[in-house]
Amino acid sequence: MNFYYPWIDPRVKQVRPEQLIGYLRKHAWREEGLVREHFYRFRQPAGPSTVLVPTPEETDDLQLCILDAVTQLAKIENRYAGELLLELLEQPFAEIEPKPGAAMSEAMAQSANR
């Protein structure tokens, strides 16, 4: 995907949700769990701000959602996005818990196929 605006740092395309989640955990953001089916919500340690991180499932708008999360995070932390990208791209991938109810849905699907 090419972004319409040329001033968007193309390295943002390399950021994965697992790296964003690892960064937020490392910086003590509070995990509030899965919201709106495809997003994890994190709350700022000392404030009311939240960041939505997309699940790692491949969707048409995954890169735009990551771009939005990086933009919000840079604004909240009062940092340049390029500076934040450097740190995010060095961040190891975080372990992500499966979506709540995923095992239940799979079990129901298997029993329906019998």
Image: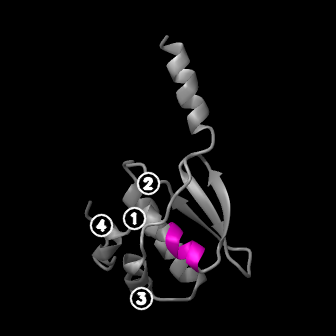
CA–CA distance between discs 1 and 4? 20 Å
Q: Which callout, 1 or 3, points to the residue nearer the camera?
A: 1
Instruction: Look at mark 2 in the image and give the residue it sits on.
Output: 56
Q: List x then y, in percent, for residue 25.
A: 59, 73
Residue ID at (44%, 54%): 56
CA–CA distance between discs 2 and 4? 23 Å
N-terminal-most mark, 3 or 2: 2
Please name whichever residue, 61 or 20, is drawn nearer the observer in this view of the structure.
Answer: 20
Mark 1: few/some/many CA within 10 Å (<14, 14-19, 20+): many
Identify the secondary structure beneath mark 2: loop
11 sits left or right of 16 in the view: left
Position of the N terminus by quadrant: bottom left
Q: Which residues are magenta?
A: 21-26
Q: Give the number of the disc on residue 4.
A: 4
Residues at marks 3 and 4 touching, judged by CB atoms closer than 8 Å = no
Q: Which callout, 3 or 4, points to the residue nearer the camera?
A: 3
N-terminal-most mark, 3 or 4: 4
CA–CA distance between discs 3 and 2? 23 Å
Residue 51: quarter of image: bottom right
Mark 4: few/some/many CA within 10 Å (<14, 14-19, 20+): few
Please name whichever residue, 114 or 48, is drawn nearer the observer in this view of the structure.
Answer: 114
Please name whichever residue, 67 or 89, is drawn nearer the observer in this view of the structure.
Answer: 89
Residues at marks 2 and 1 touching, judged by CB atoms closer than 8 Å = yes
Mark 2: few/some/many CA within 10 Å (<14, 14-19, 20+): few
Instruction: Look at mark 1 in the image and give the residue it sits on.
Output: 16
14 sits left or right of 91 in the view: left
Instruction: Look at mark 3 in the image and give the residue it sits on.
Output: 83
N-terminal-most mark, 2 or 1: 1
87 sits left or right of 4 in the view: right
